[in-house]
Image (cartoon, rainbow, N blue to C red):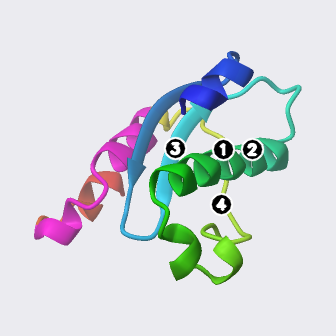
Amino acid sequence: MYRTGRYHPDWYFHEINTGDDHVHILMKIPPKYAISSVVQKLKQYSSHELKKRYKFIDQIYEKGNMWSTGYFVSTVGLNEETIRRYIERQNIADRGKEITGEFS
């Protein structure tokens, strides 16, 4: 995320957490950016940094493509705190604690 902050200081990351096969990010971006461009840059920068750090990535992903082409985006309004808690608690359910009731 260092590179992203250096090139895009007006992108603010509130929360970041990962699952086994996905990433959740709560961030604020100015409306002058297309969301698709932001997602593309995040995937590009993170892919570059991870491949630089872990040389085996090119060997385990077809053509070195570690990110899928799709993504999900939603705007945050009055439920920002609920979304923030969801991101913070990623993988807790995988450890045996059920948390879905907290978000209904």
Query: In the figure, 80 relative to 37: above or below?
Result: above
Among numbered discs 3 and 2, the one appearing first in the sequence? 3
Mark 2–mark 1 distance (CA, rounded to whole Å): 6 Å
| Range shown magenta | 81-96
Query: In the figure, 50 relative to 14: above or below?
Result: below
Q: Can residue 83 be spotted in the picture?
A: yes
Q: Are marks 1 and 3 in contact (CB under 8 Å)?
A: no
Residues packed near mark 2 inside 10 Å, few (<14), some (14 to 19) or many (20 plus): some
Q: Residue at x 37, y 63 (%)?
A: 19
Label 3 amino acid? Ile
Residues packed near mark 4 inside 10 Å, few (<14), some (14 to 19) or many (20 plus): few
Mark 4–mark 2 distance (CA, rounded to whole Å): 15 Å
x and y percentages locating residue 59 in the rendered image = 54, 79
Which tag is nearer the camera, tag 3 or tag 2? 2
Give the quarter of the image for residue 101.
bottom left
Which residue is disc 3 drawn over? 25
Q: Residue at x 67, y 42 (%)?
A: 75
**93 or 64: nearer the eye?**
64
Which residue is disc 4 drawn over? 72
Q: Callout 2: helix, strand or loop?
A: helix
Q: Are marks 2 and 1 in contact (CB under 8 Å)?
A: yes
Whether residue 87 appears in magenta in the rendering, the answer is yes
Chief SS of the magenta region: helix
Is 68 placed left or right of 34 in the picture? left
x and y percentages locating residue 99 in the rendered image = 22, 60
Among numbered discs 4 and 2, the one appearing first in the sequence? 2
Which residue is disc 1 drawn over? 45
x and y percentages locating residue 88 in the rendered image = 31, 43
Which tag is nearer the camera, tag 1 or tag 3? 1
Numbered mark located on residue 41 in the image: 2
